[in-house]
Image (cartoon, rainbow, N blue to C red):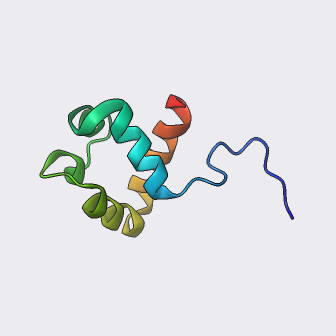
Amino acid sequence: MISRPNNKLHGKTLENILTELVARYGWPELGYRIRINCFLSNPSINSSLKFLRKTPWARKKVEELYVETF
């Protein structure tokens, strides 16, 4: 088993990360911080997850914001 003590994303699913960010910032602020259409236009966890799983650059931005925030 590999230990990753410095990885703040270890054990976190993308859904957990997104849910915590939405709880912290809300959709409008999240859309302002990360300019992704799925956060700005009729946002939902499911539609955002679908987009983020297919778009590596967007997922990276979300993960970076999570690490920066928490």
Please state if 46 lies on the left or on the right of 14 as rendered: left
Q: Is residue 11 above or below residue 55?
A: above
Residue 46 shown left or right of residue 19 in the figure: left
Q: Nearer the viewer, residue 44 or 51?
A: 44
Q: Relative to 39, does residue 33 appear above or below in the rendering?
A: above
Residue at the image position 67 percent from the left and 52 percent from the top:
10
The residue located at (56%, 37%) in the rendering is 67
Counting every numbered tag in the picture gives: 0
Indicate the position of residue 35 as horizontal and vertical percent values. 26, 42
* Location of residue 31 in the rendering, given as x and y in whole percent from the top left corner: 25, 39
Q: Residue at x 79, y 44 (%)?
A: 5
Q: Would residue 63 be found to the left or right of residue 43 on screen?
A: right
Image spot of residue 32 (x, y percent): 25, 33
Q: Tell me the quarter of the image containing the C terminus.
A: top right
Residue 34, quarter of picture = top left
Q: Nearer the viewer, residue 34 or 49?
A: 49
Above or below: residue 64 compared with residue 24: below
Which of 58/25 is in front? 25
Question: Residue furthest toward the right?
Answer: 1
Q: Which of the two residues, 8 or 35, is positioned nearer the viewer here? A: 8
As drawn, the residue found furthest toward the left would be 42
**x, y (%) of residue 24?**
38, 31
Quadrant showing the N terminus:
bottom right
Residue at 23% x, 55% y: name it.
44
